[in-house]
């Protein structure tokens, strides 16, 4: 691989208990001394990117130690069944908590709405469906320590590495892509007219009109980590018009904003194909749905890059404006299902770490012999 770290980017995708895959790779990058020009990250990988970019003296622990501590906090009783029920009852320390105390009121509100629909149109109301509509959608709430998003914003804005992440507004169907100044400088380093304005706060993408750009901020970080299960009307998000949710639901891997580089290592917490027997139960079916959605959004951007590569190779595009990009995919090779997403696994971390070191050591050796 004939490229320097200035021509290299990492694209990290978050997926609940599979975040150990990205964390293991970032530990490998730390140990190999590889600092990319850009990093895109979604969902839980935002947190690991933040830890990766922090000053080691400030962080005090390695990513491996942080992951081990996270796993220990979710496994206090050392009996999987009991730890599972404790996680359901108490949530994830320092990340999220259940909101069972809010359920009675929200349930009664939903029951009242269902009864109104049934009374208004009794011949067309289907009781089993109305029953499902009484179950509250908000079951969790974020529980980050005070100043968490402020410190994360400080680190991501002060680094020389370009950082990109996203959120999505389901009401107006728009994606917000957050950039630090380092990412914006790389994205505007082009000869095309008006390029310097393309990525300013509030500006829309030049060809994806449902995507706009903003600066990285504590509020943007909160929205980019807002899960479906937190609900849309919550005391944890007091600004009345904030409706954005975790951008991974819309675009789990961000590639378009990494095109200034010549090589992207894509660290995917799943595989492009289904591993194992096809689903015969609800949990596996939900897992298949999740992975199909994430793979579909990823392939759209992946194929765009491969098309540009082909057109550049055939002299169909101006090489002054376009260049080929090498995509290297580091995918999970083991099946982890829908229920597994609740728990991280050190085996996932170590497998990604080992494969990441092998990949990145090749990069480092090439740099030494250039």
Image (spheres, helix red, strand yellow):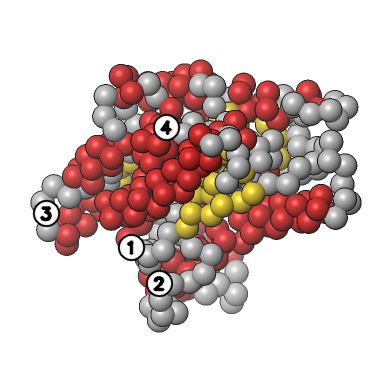
| Residue that numbered label 2 is attached to | 284
Give the Cα separation between the discs numbered 3 and 1: 18 Å
The residue depicted at 21 percent of the width and 57 percent of the height is 84
Give whichever of discs 4 and 3 has the lower sequence position.
4
The disc, 3 or 1, on the residue closer to the chain's N-terminal end is 3
- Circles 4, 1 touching at the beta carbon (< 8 Å): no
Give the SS element for disc 1: helix
Q: Position of residue 49 (x, y in %)?
A: 44, 34
Residue 297 is situated, as x and y percent measured from the top left of the image, at 62, 56
Disc nearer the start of the sequence (2/3): 3
Distance, label 4 to label 1, CA atoms, is 35 Å
Mark 4 crowd level (few <14, some 14–19, many ≥20, 10 Å Cα) = few
Secondary structure of the residue carrying numbered label 3: loop
Q: Secondary structure at mark 2?
A: helix
Instruction: Answer with mark 4 or mark 1, whichever residue precedes in sequence.
Output: 4
Which residue position is annotated with label 4?
A: 33
In the current view of this chain or complex, which residue is farthest to the front?
A: 369
Mark 1 to mark 2 CA distance (whole Å): 9 Å
The label shown at residue 339 is 1
Whether 254 is drawn above or below 275: the answer is above
Decide if residue 305 is in sight here. Answer: yes
Give 333 or 230, whichever is nearer the viewer.
333
Is residue 123 found left or right of 55 in the rendered image? right
Mark 4 → mark 3, Cα distance in angstroms: 35 Å
Residue 145 relative to residue 248: left or right? left
Q: Answer with the quarter of the image where residue 323 lies.
A: top right
Specify whether residue 250 is in view: no
Residue position marked by numbered label 3 in the rendering: 78
Label tally = 4
Label 2 vs label 3: CA separation?
A: 25 Å
Residue at (54% x, 37% y) in the render: 369
Disc 4/disc 2 C-alpha distance (Å): 39 Å
């Amino acid at each position: 691989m004939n490229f320097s770290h200035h021509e290299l980017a990492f694209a990290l995708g978050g997926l609940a208990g599979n975040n150990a895959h990205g964390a293991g790779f970032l530990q490998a990058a730390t140990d190999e001394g590889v600092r990319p020009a850009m990093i895109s990250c979604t969902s839980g990988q935002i947190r690991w990117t933040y830890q990766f970019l922090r000053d080691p003296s400030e962080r005090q622990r390695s990513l491996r130690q942080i992951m081990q501590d996270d796993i220990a906090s979710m496994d206090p009783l050392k009996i999987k069944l009991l730890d599972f029920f404790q996680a359901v009852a108490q949530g994830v320390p320092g990340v999220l908590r259940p909101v069972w105390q809010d359920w009675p009121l929200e349930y009664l509100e939903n029951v009242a709405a269902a009864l109104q629909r049934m009374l208004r149109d009794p011949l067309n109301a289907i009781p089993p469906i109305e029953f499902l509509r009484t179950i509250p959608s908000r079951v969790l709430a974020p529980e980050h320590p005070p100043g968490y998003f402020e410190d994360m914003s400080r680190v991501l804005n002060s680094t020389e590495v370009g950082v990109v992440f996203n959120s999505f507004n389901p009401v107006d169907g728009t994606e917000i892509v957050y950039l630090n100044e380092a990412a914006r400088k790389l994205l505007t380093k082009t000869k095309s007219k008006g390029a310097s304005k393309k990525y300013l706060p509030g500006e829309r993408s030049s060809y994806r009109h449902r995507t706009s750009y903003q600066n990285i901020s504590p509020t943007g970080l909160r929205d980019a980590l807002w899960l479906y299960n937190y609900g849309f009307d919550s005391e944890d998000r007091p600004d009345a018009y904030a409706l954005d949710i975790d951008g991974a639901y819309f675009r789990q891997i961000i590639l378009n904003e990494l095109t200034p580089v010549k090589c992207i290592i894509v660290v995917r917490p799943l595989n492009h194909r289904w591993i194992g027997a096809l689903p015969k139960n609800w949990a596996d079916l939900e897992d298949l749905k999740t992975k199909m959605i994430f793979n579909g959004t990823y392939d759209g951007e992946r194929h765009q890059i491969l098309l540009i590569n082909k057109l550049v190779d055939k002299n169909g595009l101006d090489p002054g404006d376009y260049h080929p990009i090498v995509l290297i995919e580091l995918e999970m090779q083991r099946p982890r299902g829908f229920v597994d997403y609740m728990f991280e696994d050190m085996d996932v971390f170590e497998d990604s770490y080992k494969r990441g070191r092998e990949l990145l050591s090749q990069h480092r050796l090439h740099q030494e012999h250039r």
